[in-house]
Image (tube, rainbow, N blue to C red):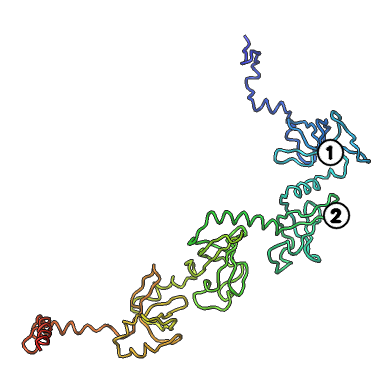
Amino acid sequence: MSKKDVFGDDVSSNNKSQDFASMFEDSLGGVGKKMSVGFAYTAEILSISKEEAFVSTPSHQDAMILRNDLLDENKELKYKVGDKLDVVVVANRGGEIRVSRAGMKKSNPDMDSLEDAHDMELPVEGRVLEVCNGGFRVSIHNKTAFCPLSQMDYKVTDQQAYINKKFDFLITQFDPRGRNLVVSRRKLLDLQKAENEGSFLANTKAGDILNGTVKRFEKFGAFIELGGGVEGLCHISEIGWSRIQDPSEVLSLNQTVQVKVLKVEDVDGRVKISLSVKQAGGEGDPWNMVPEKFKVGSVHTGIVEKKEQYGLFVQIAPGITGLLPRAKWRDSTEAAAFENKKKGDTFPVQIDEVLFELKRISLGIPGLAEDHSWRDHSSATSQKGAPGGFTTNKFGNLASLMQKNGNKK
């Protein structure tokens, strides 16, 4: 007895082993796999519109052909719906198949692909061949294109560095005959940068620690790339731990550095990022050597950086500054000498306290330990009694008595 399916039709035992996927593949005859660029077949015209037409394919999907491909030498429509013609697949991507009449010059899949890339502003890969007058010659899909010098990068310092390297480009000017092909890498970099900056603004905040690459120097600082073409400026005051005249004294081009984001803002549609190398705590941070080199009690030569009412700020190493409070010298015999110290003066200082997490160091004067001898004296007088019969316990009463006597007078 034969089995019937849900529609009441007989189902043979051979069909039992076939699943839907295999039956679907059989219905296509495997031709879907053949619809690659260069595949030639005979198609039937299904419809014709003002600019394009649709034709059949051996697969379940229709293909598009330009109306111009259906014109004769007099620019008159040569075909009508239902006619058949030989075509070649010139593009198959994103679910769309494009064909062209077989035998036409325009059926060159490379040129069609480039035209698509130009129309849809899609990036294409190219290899830089050589330097020429005003720019570079670039090989793209076996065609030679021209990239102006200003469109290769944000700043080109060494033209030879680009030779034989592959980059993505946007086609800015296209000639169907392939004689005038102009490309731009910078335009693509700008688009990518705008997208990356938006993502950066959404995911980065002041205080974040990032890794970057030093890209170029200016007198006022260094520009550091943070990825995806996003750059920030590290002002010269935030590069070195001591005063420097030029960023190159501390950094080098293409060096990887750790930076701290100080500020991120959108100014008139442009993202401005302020960075700091000093505050990032990277390998070059001089504070990393403080626990080992500047232990409490050790003596070092310091240089006066700044004088304030409450004390002197003294540099004990590039990027490491401590405070010598006025209270440390106020009652010493050298008080006048410290009061007269000025910026640049050098003298020995002693490490009294280190607060590593806060990056603070309290300094003292070597050899001027606090005098605690009065404590020993007060202890002795409390046992023997003070002169005049008063013990130290009565000194407080002595003061009050003297005050009362003064009042009586």
Along the viewing direction, whichever of 216 and 195 lies nearer the viewer: 195
Q: Label 2 neighbourhood size at 10 Å, few (<14), some (14-19), many (20+)? A: few
Q: Label 1 neighbourhood size at 10 Å, few (<14), some (14-19), many (20+)? A: some
* Residue at the disc numbered 2: 179
Q: Measured from the top left, where is residue 87 in percent x and y? A: 84, 36
Q: Residue furthest left?
A: 389
Q: Quadrant of residue 73?
A: top right
Amino acid beneath label 2: Arg
Q: Residue furthest right?
A: 74
- At x 72%, y 26%, the residue is 27
In this rendering, the answer to whether 15 lies above or below 347 is: above
Q: Quadrant of residue 299?
A: bottom left
Amino acid beneath label 1: Arg
Q: Measured from the top left, where is residue 280 in percent x and y? A: 49, 66
Identify the mark at residue 67; answer none if there is no mark: 1
Q: Which structural element holds mark 1? A: helix
Q: Measured from the top left, where is residue 81 in percent x and y? A: 84, 30
Task: Measure how far apart labels 2 and 1 are at the Cα level.
Answer: 23 Å
- At x 72%, y 50%, the residue is 121
User: Which-is-in-front pick, marks 2 and 1?
Assistant: 1
In this rendering, the answer to whether 300 lies above or below 94 is: below
